Image: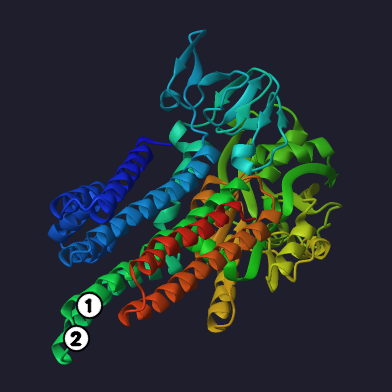
Amino acid sequence: MDKKQKTAIIRISAAAILLIAGVLTEKVLDLGDILPVAVFMSAYLVAGYDTLLEAVMNIRRGQIFDENFLMAIATIGAIGLGDHSEAVFVMLFYLIGETFENYAVNRSRNSISELMDIRPDHANLIKDGKEMKVDPYDVKKDDVIIIKPGERIPLDGEIIEGYSSVDTSSLTGESMPVDVGTGDGINSGCLNMTGMLKVRVSGEYEDSTVAKVLDMVENAGNRKARVEKFITKFARYYTPVVVISAAVMALLPPLSFPGESFSDWISRALIFLVISCPCALVISVPLAFFGGVGGASRKGILVKGTAFLEAMADVDTVIFDKTGTITTGKFKVEKVSPVDMGEGEVLELAAYVESYSDHPISMSIKEAYGKDIDKSRVEDVTELAGKGIRADIGGRTVYVGNGRLMRELGYEDLPEGSASTAIYVADEERYLGCISITDTVKENSGSSIKALENSGVRNTIMLTGDRRSVAEKVAEEVGVDRVYSELLPGDKLELAENIIDDSEAEKSKGHVVFVGDGINDAPTLARADVGIAMGVLGSDAAIEAADIIIMDDDLSKISKVIDIAKSTIRIAKQNVVFALSVKAVVMIMGAFGVANMWEAVFADVGVAVIAILNSMRAMKTG
């Protein structure tokens, strides 16, 4: 319990005691009029001084119509009519409601804060052979740090010495520790459990996984859902309307109909004002979405804004990139098929051409070559978008790429290779050979796509730059509805735009989601209604462009975030319908003089508390 909550409890207790004392002095002890009024006013100020002050400050700012103004007018009016105990009662219960609301919001925030309590306190930097404890912000790229057992990993990097088990649950939501050792990459924010690790840092703190994750969570509320925007706009117009309605109610009947009492109609108008306070909507609906974002974070799914969570509740089409999304993205050379030269020579030429590339296929070729590459032999490296790479190797121009590149060079009737991907090697004079590279389908890709269908997704589509035979084989294995192959990056974007345009043309259809991980996927991720990036294999560009990030690359979590989104929307709508329905009924009762302050307080504070309790269920969804 924080200091603010303790202060609120003390105020509630003091105001309640003074209220009871006021009732005793007025009703039981009969000590006159002055003392009970003084006690009641003391209780009123203890319970409502901040509400009155906030109302005055807002009026000075020109922001007149809010819940503070409603409470101030209603209770001051009650005091003017001589109903001191009712005025104290309303303000006291309003304070109780506000305290509960703050507790609920803080609990939701703390739940996410605990989940994302991954900000490192320090880094153990090795400098001049000595270990020193420094702020993570002071560590530079290529510095060497030591991570001891039980410490939070402060920065991203590569292990250069040591073996350990790492708890990745704060990022991925998975409880099973991951074993890591020399040569493995590790992400900041995870917990080193068993062994000491020496790590070469791959980037500065502001570019680290932990910094990006914290930034995403902290700014998730900046992109509001339509329901949240509606409630904000609704409250802006709703409050002035009810204040004007209350004024008309207080003045019109006594002025229009002989015998009607001003005090009676003013009392009804004040009850009407208490009932009309929009707290239940203003607090509970954003809290539901905040809870949904937190629930997704618990599963290792980072949502950059509640608008994207709302969009996931109505998904019609999911488009997948293949490599690194449906497949593992971990390649290895399976076979080398040379023409009139040795396998080693073909592999060497390919490795030299690919020496400056960090693409997974390039890495697999260099790994298969297994020797040091003298980059001084490599000149004039040119990436041929969507086709391959050209480079001069010792004065010889060599091409490494796909079938499209070979056909442009005039080489036809190429072998397809024995594995999922065929990389061809040629120079300006002749075709030199084929390197067959395997990329395995993720174990749960098929079940994940089936789960999407069960969640209401009608169309699943796969886009890839691979040749048709490979793409169709993978599509058949995992069960996607349609597949488009041999695509350039621009082709992917154009196809995605056509699918989105078709979806928008048919108003009954839902949103289009694109799932990818590569740099070339970034434009499509940005263009889709919702872009989802793979957090482990995903490039920085893809993660930056995406709206949702799956921290452990588990495709099954797409259906989970859809379920979380639907549950969150359902809870938010329940709150809207419940709050408006109860308020409408009690407001009518108040207008006809049937409801008293008890019903008014329930319609305000009681409804708010129930709606907030309902919103907190969103934290446990999924």
Please report contact status of discs 2 and 1: CB closer than 8 Å, yes or no. Answer: yes
Image quadrant of residue 83?
bottom left
Separation (CA) of disc 2 from disc 1: 8 Å
Residue drawn at point x = 65 percent, y = 45 percent: 552
**At label 2, which amino acid type do we have?**
Glu
Q: Does residue 324 sit above or below 154 in this rendering?
A: below
Q: Nearer the viewer, residue 239 or 114?
A: 239
The spot of residue 157 in percent (x, y) is 57, 29
The spot of residue 406 in percent (x, y) is 71, 57
Q: SS class of the residue under badge 1?
A: helix
* Marking on residue 260: 2
* Residue 55 shown left or right of residue 23 in the figure: left
The spot of residue 186 in percent (x, y) is 62, 31
Q: Quadrant of the N terminus?
A: top left
Write down the residue under mark 1: 264
Viewer can see residue 332: yes
Q: Quadrant of the C terminus?
A: bottom right
Q: Nearer the viewer, residue 619 or 255?
A: 255
Q: Residues within 10 Å of mark 2 (few under 14, many from 20)?
A: few
Q: Does residue 568 sit above or below 6 in this rendering?
A: below
